[in-house]
Image (cartoon, helix red, strand yellow):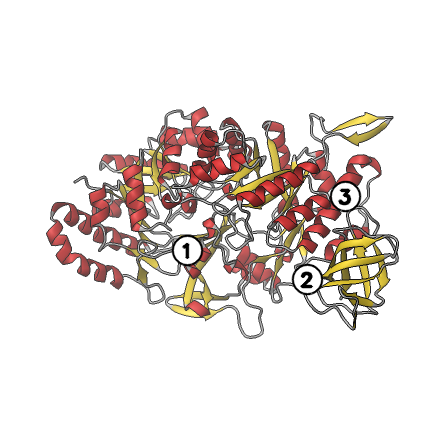
Amino acid sequence: MTKPELLVTPGSVSEMKRQIEAGADAFVIGEQRYGLRLAGEFSRAQIQEAVTLAHEHGKKVYVAVNAIFHNKIADELDEYVQFVRESGADAIVYGDPAVLMAVRASAPGFPLHWSPETIATNWYTANYWGKRGSVRAVLSRELSMDAIIETKENAEVAIEVQVHGMTCMFQSKRPLLGHYFEYMGKNMEIKKRQGAQNMLLHDEERSNKYPIYEDENGTHIMSPNDMCIIDELQEMIEAGIDSFKIDGVLQTEEYRIASTKLYRTAIDLCVENPDQYEEEKEELLEAAEALQQDHRPLDSGFFFKETVY
Amino acid sequence: MAALKNDSISAIVDGKRVIVKKPELLAPAGTLEKLKIAIRYGADAVYIGGQEYGLRSNAGNFTFDDMKEGVAFAQRYGAKVYVTTNIFAHNENIDGLEDYLRGLGEVGIAGIIVADPLIIETCRRVAPNVEVHLSTQQSLSNWRAVQYWKEEGLDRVVLARETTGEEMRLMKEKVDIEIETFIHGAMCIAYSGRCVLSNHMTARDSNRGGCCQSCRWDYNLVEMEDGEETALTTGEDSPFAMSPKDLRLLQSIPGLVELGIDSLKIEGRMKSIHYVATVVGVYRKVIDAYCADPENFTIQPEWLEELEKCANRPAAPAFFEGIPGADEQLFGVHGKKASHDFTGLVVDYDANTQIVTLQQRNFFRPGDTVEFFGPDMDTFTQVVGTVVDEEGNELDAARHPLQIVKFKVERPVSKDDMMRKGL
């Protein structure tokens, strides 16, 4: 069995060093001008530094250029994708076809990971973007385990799946927090809470608390629970899923490092000693639960949840 | 808004500038009845949903037979019918797609509105005579992505609701492709396609038609500091809300025409025939008036008043002029009542007796002041006199939905005209 890549989202170059020790194989980094919902901001110099560091250790760096672009930034993309290629990074993560156009024009042949978040929902469309230059599809978080396996069986591109962390439920172009404070006449609050990452929408009916924050890309609302399928990796590893991602956005560095360690253990066990994995997986799940804040329980996302329409 | 650099929009006729490239007015049609009304009231094209692959699983969607009838009706008026097939498909939706698209190809529709490349490519293969339009679900908001879809051979793109007029201009200047944009109706506050609130909150897949509009609900805002929660909304405050006002670009129609936008779209397949008739009727007038004489065009206050008669939310121009402010969202009370009730649909008129035969749609009674409007008449008001039922029995009120009633009208009316009452 091939070992899937363990992909993480570091907050800084210094964290990357710790992540490498913790067992990460690859990193998604970038800056919010071009990338969505990142765990940290990486300037161009830092991306360069990150690539050098990762490659010294045989690790990979993927640069997030997955925002929904308007004309202004769409015109900057040629220059940015050229920079990414020159940095030596291993791939660009994108969702907007404008990035595909920029890569064709300015960095032809550079590897692309298709990652449009909520809309990567079937194998045919994954292959469609594969035929247009993508080497990997990052699947939507709203898919079931069965759908993920079926997609892998039919995919001509590598398949990446998020296995742990928060997922995005909503992105608006409008600054919704700022607008709310403005409506309430609390203009002071807008400045005070600029860039704040500790706000929650409380849904009393469901007893859920959804993280909400604003940045250059608008307003983002995140899932109330962290998904965790550390105890359900076997089927996906057997199916040959290529990359397991831990999304560490809005988490602390300590949380991210600890979860990387747990998944490193789980993946290694599952591949090298499946029987031992069966025995230890409950303990691994308990260890993951121990990392959680009280208001953010773990769940298994949409892996085993039926969705109707 | 200034005209495009390459002005193919207008011509000088008898010394007067007129618009020669009139945009298509595209209306929603949730049912066959709504399709007919939309076209009668001036839509150049309508979009409908089929039994599958569309985003309104609760709308009264069309069977293939309904579509044939709709297409035949539309053709009599030179109008087109498009079908929304804009879900993001899951693997389980692939089976059956070819048959469905082949069926669409056979009923004579002009095009489909699609988000998922799976459906784009399959349609090309099995129903190549059908035009393919990219849905707003792809959140298309820059010219290079427009260029991408052009090169992929799409016939038309529908822009993201987040696109400004100036952004549209650049797209039009850079890429030769038909552009469709929303001008009126309810809108997502999220980028369309990038919201799965319903999936999380109600286990319904928003990108396959299961949206339960969780964005219109109220929430409390809480701040978390060192594990301690502080409520930022307290008792006296309105709760946190993110409900957008409805889009209304009536005043921007001149700008949209001058930009060469090809199709102006009204939202609302779930809306009533009264809504469709009113909104389509108003925009028909606005577009015609501007195109006939752009130099002397002014916005008539009665057009805006007319829209209020069916509006159940306050309206705003949203992104057309830039990112909308706090005043374009609804806090506290989220809706409002329309200024008028739809009280009846004209099914017949006898010119000799001046008696109208009306299908009741809301309560009215003798003595009420009512207004008649329609596609080929000037709106008039009158007081309702004696009302009788089909058997000629006098009624103290028209109480029953769809009941057939008759009374004398002061001016001629015709089938499909409507009667409404101020509230």
Q: Which residue was labeled with disc 1?
A: A308
Quadrant showing the C terminus of chain B: bottom right
Three-letter amino acid code at the position of disc 3: Val
From the image, tell me which residue sits under label 2.
B402
The image position of residue B113, as x and y in percent, is 54, 39
Q: Could you tell me the amino acid type at mark 1? A: Val
Question: Is A211 on the left-hand or right-hand side of A3?
Answer: right
Q: Chain of mark 1?
A: A
Question: Can you identify the residue that label 3 sits on?
Answer: B286
Q: Is residue B201 left or right of residue B141?
A: left
- Give whichever of B30, B287 is nearer the camera: B30
The residue that appears at 46% across and 42% down in the rendered structure is A67
> Which callout, 3 or 2, points at the residue further toward the start of the chain?
3
Q: Distance between the Cα atoms at labels 2 and 1?
A: 34 Å
Mark 2: secondary structure: loop
Left or right: where A48 falls relative to A283 = right
Q: Is residue A87 above or below residue B96?
A: above
Residue type, numbered disc 2? Leu
Q: Residue at x 74, y 47 (%)?
A: B281
